[in-house]
Amino acid sequence: MNKVIQLKVVDVVVWAVSLLFAFGLLIGEAMADSDSFTATNKKWAAECGSCHIAYPPQLLPAASWRRIMAGLDRHFGSDASLDAASAAEIGAFLERNAGHGKRGRGEPLRITESRWFLHKHDEVRASAWKNPQVKSAANCGACHAGAARGDFDDDAVRIPR
Ligand code: HEC
Ligand code: HEC
């Protein structure tokens, strides 16, 4: 190969690599803002999904999960205590997959009190939260049919009337 062609080839390769990189960043960004959560752990699904849906770890910052796991014996008026081994496994799973960016701020004890949640739901009328079919904002499945599967995509939202 002569020098000029060699330089052209290098040029094209550099271009291709930076394009791929930019594309990767875009996909990463889209995933960070995705509203479908698939991370799972058997213990977590069984223990944290027995009274309500197992809330996806991505919906609260790590600091919030630490607070919640430290107070399971007085958990929103219930006793949700666990043996030490299960608590350690679940705590690690929650923190490893905890929310980042807009879902990583502060350390609210409730998903329903975090700023991103209030923002996403600011068009839900006050009366909708009090509907007997909803009962509590924490009852995600009343409006998000796929909540138990971690699917909160806005395409599947239906507010009961
Ligand atoms: C014995 C029943 C029980 C178990 C087991 C349980 N919870 Fe809860 N949890 C509750 C109740 C009751 C509430 C309050 C629901 C409401 O306000 O409508 C709640 C609320 C929550 C909330 C706040 C929801 C909101 O308002 O945003 C989080 C987060 C949560 N639980 C996480 C967990 C995790 C993590 C586990 C497993 C380690 C767990 N829960 C196990 C009963 C339970
Ligand atoms: C009273 C009905 C209702 C309840 C209960 C409810 N939501 Fe929503 N949720 C909505 C509506 C309406 C939207 C807005 C959809 C839109 O933007 O078109 C929404 C949006 C969202 C979004 C953003 C979806 C997107 O694609 O932008 C997430 C994530 C979400 N909710 C999570 C939750 C979680 C977690 C819970 C339970 C802790 C919950 N919601 C409880 C009605 C509800």
Image (tube, rainbow, N blue to C red):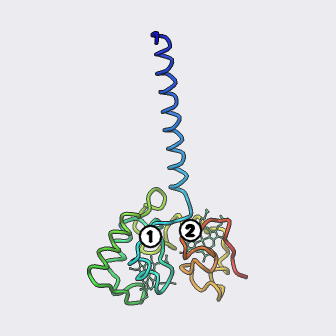
- Of all residues, the one furthest to the right in this rendering is 161
69 to the left or right of 48: left
Callout 1: few (<14), some (14-19), or many (20+) C-alpha neighbours within 10 Å? some
Q: Residue at x 48, y 38 (%)?
A: 21
> Residue 54 has which mark?
none
User: What residue does disc 2 label?
Assistant: 118
User: What residue does disc 1 label?
Assistant: 40
Label 1 CB, ligand 1: below 8 Å? Answer: no
Quadrant field for ligand 1: bottom left
Callout 2: helix, strand or loop? helix
90 to the left or right of 116: left
Q: Residue at x 53, y 64 (%)?
A: 116
Percent position of residue 97, x then y? 41, 64
Q: Earlier in the sequence, mark 1 or mark 2?
A: 1
Give the residue type at disc 2.
Leu
Callout 1: helix, strand or loop? loop
Q: Residue at x 39, y 84 (%)?
A: 75
- Of all residues, the one furthest to the front in this rendering is 1
Q: Residue at x 45, y 66 (%)?
A: 39
The front one of 33 and 129 is 33
Percent position of residue 115, x then y? 51, 65
Callout 2: few (<14), some (14-19), or many (20+) C-alpha neighbours within 10 Å? few
Percent position of residue 125, x then y? 67, 75
Q: Are marks 1 and 2 in contact (CB under 8 Å)?
A: no
Front tag of 1 and 2: 1
Give the residue type at disc 1.
Thr
Image vertical order of residue 89 relative to residue 100, above or below? below
The front one of 16 and 100 is 16
In space, the residues marked 1 and 2 are separated at their CA atoms by 25 Å
Where residue 62 sits, quadrant-wise, is bottom left
- Of all residues, the one furthest to the left in this rendering is 84
